[in-house]
Image (cartoon, rainbow, N blue to C red):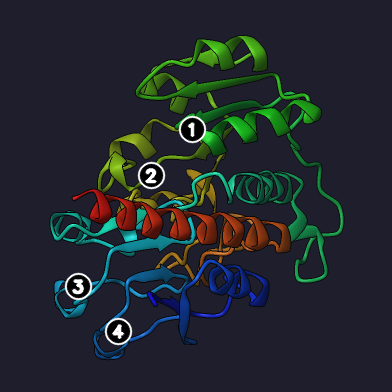
Amino acid sequence: MKSILITDSLFIQPEHEQKLKDAGFEIARLDKPEATEEELVEAIKGKHGYILGGIEKLTDRIIDAADQLEAIVFTGIGYKDFIPNHEYVTKKGIAIGNTPDAPTHAVAEWAVTMALAMNRNIFDLGRAGTKKFMTSKGIQNQKVGIIGLGRIGKEIASMLQAFKPESISYFSRNRHPDAENSLGLNYKDMNRLLSESDIIFLCVSKDAGKHFIGKNELHVMKRGALLVTFMAEGIIDDEALLEALSSGKIRIASDHPIAGSDSIPMSICYPFNASSAFNTESELKLCSDIATETMINLLNTKDNVNRVN
């Protein structure tokens, strides 16, 4: 009987464990959100499947210890952040799966929530703030820019319709005529979008490259513009970002920590302690459903290939 390792306890609840057992697999859990390399080296031995539900990062040493491993499924989109050696993994004949559809609504919902909170001055006017009366910008009549029009970018554009922005523009490596027509989006080049937008949603993956948003891009942005980001660490140049925030040039809401931002007011910089944009009950259920089904399919496919060969 094939065995599947599952890390952490946020995803893959008892109903999903049962589904895996009903499909003929044994389950082994390492109930830690960030297992060490040593723990994973021991836990991965003899396992045919591995559902990566924590925030551990795989190393070549862990993969070399995986003497039976056929498939890894990451419970989210950005698996390259947690499987940085993904090329080595696939060269060893180990399949990698993820759950790209699962976090879409939850992350888009978080992004729009943060845009509303920042642009309605919630952190100045609320109990933790010091202001009693301020005129806010809101989203209505604001120029919105979306960088990266994948699943989440499109979902954000759809959600924003209810708030009546002046316009919604996007920049992406590829144009999306269907989305332009159905959502009323305008395509703009990167610099123009940065310079004209009041609110910018950064929706690119790690594939965009380190410091995709750097000093030059931050310089181009409108004074007082809001940047909402949630996808991957390293996409923004932190040093240049802190300079832009400290000078009051821009504002930011981020679901990742921003080193050195403790002295910047929450109304200008609101980072989360750890990535939380995805974390809703509905998303966890959907992600676990997809991860479970993907693992079953990958291991069964491997079986079928072996039988043919």
Quarter occupied by residue 87: bottom left
Q: CA distance from mark 2 to mark 4?
A: 26 Å
Horizontal arrangement in the rendering, residue 260 relative to residue 215 (left or right): right
Marks 3 and 1, the one that precedes in the sequence: 3
**Image x and y of residue 123, in percent:** 72, 60
Label 1, residues with CA under 10 Å away: few <14, some 14-19, many ≥20: some
- Between disc 3 and disc 2, the foreground one is 3
Three-letter code for the amino acid on which mark 2 is drawn: Ser
Residue with the mark numbered 4: 40
Does residue 173 show up? Answer: yes
Number of callouts: 4
Marks 3 and 2, the one that precedes in the sequence: 3
SS type, badge 1: loop
Quarter occupied by residue 285: bottom right
Residue with the mark numbered 1: 150
Label 2, residues with CA under 10 Å away: few <14, some 14-19, many ≥20: some
Residue with the mark numbered 2: 205
Which one is in front, 178 or 273? 178
Above or below 198: residue 19: below
- Between disc 3 and disc 1, the foreground one is 3
Task: For the residues labelled 2 and 1, say whether their Cβ atoms are less than 8 Å apart.
Answer: yes
- Between disc 2 and disc 4, the foreground one is 4
Task: For the residues labelled 2 and 4, say whether their Cβ atoms are less than 8 Å apart.
Answer: no
**Image x and y of residue 291, in percent:** 51, 59
State which quarter of the image contains the N terminus. Answer: bottom left
Residue with the mark numbered 3: 63
Which one is in front, 122 or 88? 88
Three-letter code for the amino acid on which mark 4 is drawn: Leu
**Image x and y of residue 265, in percent:** 59, 63
Does residue 234 show up? Answer: no
Marks 4 and 3, the one that precedes in the sequence: 4
Task: For the residues labelled 4 and 3, say whether their Cβ atoms are less than 8 Å apart.
Answer: no
